[in-house]
Amino acid sequence: MTDILGAINGVIWSNWLVYLCLAAGVYFSVRSRLLQVRHFPEMIRLLARGKKSPSGVSSFQALAMSLAGRVGTGNIAGVATAIAFGGPGAMFWMWAVAFLGASTSFVESTLGQIYKTRDPLTGEYRGGPAYYFSRAFAHTRAHRYFTVYGFIFAAVTVLACGVLLPGVQANSMTAAMGNAWDVPSWAVAVGTVIVLAFVVIGGVKRIASFATLVVPFMAVTYVLVAMIVVFVNAEKIPAVLNDVFSSAFGLHSTFGAVLGLAVMWGVKRGVYSNEAGQGTGPHAAAAAEVSHPAKQGLVQAFAVYVDTLFVCTATGFLILSTGAYRVFDNGSESGDVLADGGILAAGAEVGPAYTQSAFDTVFPGIGASFIAVSLAFFCFTTMVAYYYMAETNLRFIVGRFATVRLGGQRGVTIGRATTLGLQAVILVASAYGCVSTASGAWTLGDIGVGLMAWLNILGILVLQQPAFAALRDFERQKKQGLDPVFDPLALGITGATYWETYDPKGERVEA
């Protein structure tokens, strides 16, 4: 089974997916005239402006929900993996995919807002790739094909976020706790299931409140402590930067041999970490209460910066400046050691142990515990975000049958029954991840990320026009000194039924 899964992962994460992620980012950046640079001040301003409503969360809460999915083990164990298998140059390609991916994130998140809808059971906003694929071509002959495409994406997302991806987070969290405190994996599994069940059963509002409280605090704390370690090793930063940039283009005498792997692992772990193009960001973006879709698109573009340029960079500099790395010559731990920073214990597995060893160089005996606590919060919030995305896509699949009752008027609704089933599945998947091997968990996670990225990026390359029409409309209204309000019909956008009856001064009623 391990060999089969490895072969599937190799096909999904071929060079073609790497090229697709980079090419889409370049194209969207050019077409948007580098919105990730031009609108950076606006991104910051919008974070403080949004307000929540009975149906939606605020822009900042939506950002926190999005960051809950983005900031996880990919920022700690994932960066260590990228450096181990791709050399220091992988860091450059993580930066590249983040900068370019900010424009991709804007497109997909704006589309998520444009084509959002209300949940018939809870009244909360729902949206994401499955929704915009099925709604965007509602008045064309292509409608049936894109509806099928939307259902395929929804099914893949339920599989990925409900089954394949939670195990990666749970496994890294368990490994870090085991390294720090010798906690048995079964104990972590039990604790994870109990706390996760409490949060996910509360619905999107409890998820948003939890993410808003935990994610910003832990991200800032982690970056600040990591920067203290980097500052202590400040004299090594010039050498670290030289290693990163020279090996990114194959010019380093030692790391030049892994140039192709640097690109592959940089993009692979970059996409896993910041999720730009994967199709996860639009789910949180759609839950926000805003007057114009481009507003939340810009906020979600900023989330990519927070994830990779801040958190991942802190981890990368931490590992490289302290020497807490090993680089292997064939993209896996089975290869010969190409370079060794010299402080890792013999046999240390690629992952949280690298980052824990780096912290221990400055905070002896404390580093392992700090990473264990950080990963506990980061990984847990990511699992919560995975559940939200899986539930959103499950609700899409169930559709209008969500309110149908099983067994008569007193029976449970189909929507409630399937939600309970999904909650049970993600709890089992998380528990299994705690006791599984790291390589097996990462393989399953990569398969989930890759499948979603293929479907979403190809889809938004076809369905990009409404996002750019919304961007131009947003910019036009800003130049006029207005607070932008979205009118899809005026822009020739069909299928955005929520916005067609939008009243910025009153209650929103969906047709």
Image: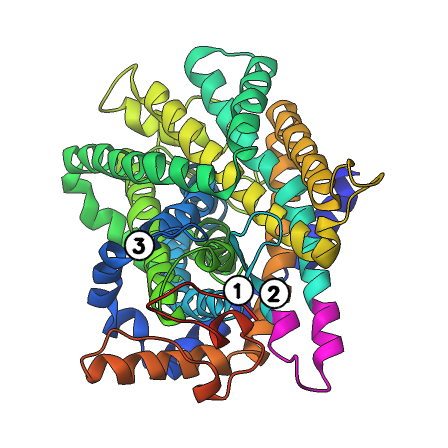
Q: Position of residue 249 (x, y in %)?
A: 39, 64
Q: Position of residue 474 (x, y in %)?
A: 32, 78
Can you identify the residue that label 2 sits on?
131
For the residue labelled by badge 3, is the local secondary structure a helix, a strand or a loop? loop
Residue 423, compared with residue 42, is above or below; it is: above
Q: Are marks 1 and 3 in contact (CB under 8 Å)?
A: no
Q: Amino acid at mark 1?
A: Lys
For the residue labelled by badge 2, is the local secondary structure a helix, a strand or a loop? helix
**Crowding at mark 3 (Cα within 10 Å: few <14, some 14-19, many 20+):** some
Q: Position of residue 340 (x, y in %)?
A: 40, 35
Can you identify the residue that label 1 sits on?
116
Residue 327 visible (yes or no): no
Magenta extent: 133-149
Q: Are marks 2 and 1 in contact (CB under 8 Å)?
A: yes
Label located before the other in sequence (2 or 3): 3
Q: On the rendered structure, is 229 left or right of 416? A: left
The residue depicted at 50 percent of the width and 12 percent of the height is 183
Q: Amino acid at mark 2?
A: Tyr
Q: Amino acid at mark 3?
A: Lys
Can you identify the residue that label 3 sits on?
51
Question: Which one is in front, 407 or 383?
Answer: 407
Q: Are marks 2 and 3 in contact (CB under 8 Å)?
A: no
